[in-house]
Image (cartoon, helix red, strand yellow):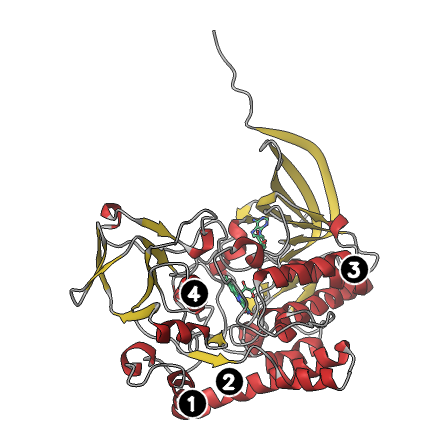
Amino acid sequence: MTTVEAPRQAESTAVEHFDVLIVGAGISGVGGAYHLTKQRPGTSFVVLEGLDSFGGTWWMHRYPGIRSDSDLHTFGYRFKPWVGPPIATAEEILSYMGEVIDENDLAPHIRYNHRISSAKWSSDDCRWTIEATHTDPETGAEESKRFTANFLWMCQGYYRHSEGYTPEWEGMDDYLGEIVHPQTWPEDIELAGKRVVVIGSGATAATLVPNIADDCEHVTILQRSPTYFRPGRNAVDLAETLRELDVDEEWIHEIVRRKMNHDGAVFTKRSFEEPEVVKRELLDAVRQHLPEGYDMETHFTPRYRPWRQRIAFVPDADLFKGISSGKASVVTDEIERFTPRGIMTKSGEELEADIIVTATGFNMNVMGDIAFERDGEPVDFHDTVTYRGMMFTGVPNMLWVFGYFRASWTLRADLLADFVCRLLAHMEARDARRVDVRLRPEDEDMELLPWIDTENFNPGYLLRALDLLPMRGDKPEWQHTQDYWNEKDWIPAIDLDGPEFVYR
Ligand SMILES: Cc1cc2nc3c(=O)[nH]c(=O)nc-3n(C[C@H](O)[C@H](O)[C@H](O)COP(=O)(O)OP(=O)(O)OC[C@H]3O[C@@H](n4cnc5c(N)ncnc54)[C@H](O)[C@@H]3O)c2cc1C
């Protein structure tokens, strides 16, 4: 007798078509939806989100203390005032985003539990076909869904949400305690009376450590090398003064945004022009919060110049308070191997731990692990050249929102949303169904370089992914400049009839 297995996934035959399909309901995708409704009211669109709610990064990450390290006047949207303290918890960011969705009736446009697996461009039809799997949140039943769209707006972020990056260390299998990655923090983790070692020295470790220090017996930060931190009060003096003067929140938001952006620009410029002075200022600020005679040189003096990696803000110096109180300590050393009881460092010290937290970063993913095709051929984004870090040669009718490293991500999400709306209007005016970016004759011999200049910015997750990421050129048009202060003027001024755009 032959048994025929029931198909695991039901096939839905209906194909829905939209003018625009937004991938992801994080801060970029929800912002995109807002701008489309305001700037292109007649445009049909859908937001497909793999998770069961909005927020992306802020929905996925659940580790204790999870918060922004940018101020919310600039990480918040341009169009909705932020009225709380500048550094916000994930919960506060989600509640802010929820208000944006409610106040602008965006919910009917968002489909949750829709994970996109492929996006295929057809030049004959001038449209994308998107395959997604819808998972029923109640039953877990999966159904294939197909959508078509004229324009694809990639707001899927830059890293894999399902798992963090954990390097392989010898002996990990022998370790008898629990290994946890902050990205998949277990809800029921028991910290009381536990010795915890947190591997890593970035923003995640700096946030997590003060927030668990009181709950566990002791927490040790194990870092290979130190990071720059900026301790400060979780408040903006100017915002407080303006509130005292009873100024409207809309004004406060705009004025404080300008102030934060201005200060950020000055700081970035100084980091390049007088790195030693900036370094000294940063280190002095940290030293003030540490006990007399603390070994700053070993634990808090980075080996790189300021701003080569993101500088983590430490609100109210909470990390350093934990160190001063003795609940937290820092070990700067390399890992030799895991042991059954903990970690053996290269200098021969065994750090005993009941729980090891690997705050070792992300796995970057390009385009949300979606398989792209153009006219039946797979697209390898590494073979493309980026137009201003948002569009790609050989990939029509598509834009990716990749924010800034040294300024808030959302500043760029807003700027690019304006650009998409302008581009769609321009295509309509020209009666064009397709837009491509292409190198101009003067760009043909341009040297092609990796996505980022690693001299300029070099976090591990980007270095590990350079082989997957698109190429850049040596002119601002063909790179993600990471320069908000210029892009805020450049992007609105892009000539859509310039030779780098081809319409059909
Ligand atoms: C812990 C942490 C703190 C951070 N703090 C800051 C900060 O203070 N300031 C700052 O500027 N940046 C910060 N960042 C960077 C941060 O990720 C961005 O600022 C921003 O939140 C990214 O928003 P996004 O909407 O572009 O992407 P994400 O927040 O990553 O959201 C993308 C969404 O797309 C969905 N998606 C992806 N692939 C698919 C698919 N194939 N099918 C369907 N849906 C898909 C995901 O499920 C997700 O919901 C932080 C990052 C982390 C991890």
**Inter-mark Cα distance, 3 to 4:** 36 Å
Q: Which residue is mark 2?
A: 268
In front of the other: label 2 or label 3? Answer: 3
Q: Which residue is mark 3?
A: 103
Image coordinates of residue 74 in percent, x first then y, are 63, 75
Quick one: label 4 or label 2, which is nearer the N terminus?
Answer: 2
Residue 504 visible in this rendered orientation of the protein: no
In front of the other: label 1 or label 2? Answer: 1
In the rendered image of this protein, does residue 79 appear above or below residue 380? below
Q: Report whether the residue tagged 3 is closer than 8 Å to ligand 1.
A: no
Q: Amino acid at mark 3?
A: Glu
Q: Are marks 4 and 1 in contact (CB under 8 Å)?
A: no
Q: Are marks 2 and 3 in contact (CB under 8 Å)?
A: no
Label 1's element? Answer: helix
Q: Nearer the viewer, residue 93 or 14?
A: 93
In front of the other: label 4 or label 2? Answer: 2
Q: Amino acid at mark 1?
A: Glu
Q: Amino acid at mark 4?
A: Leu
Q: Quadrant of ligand 1?
A: bottom right
Q: Which residue is mark 4?
A: 462
Residue found 35% across the figure and 67% down from its top: 327
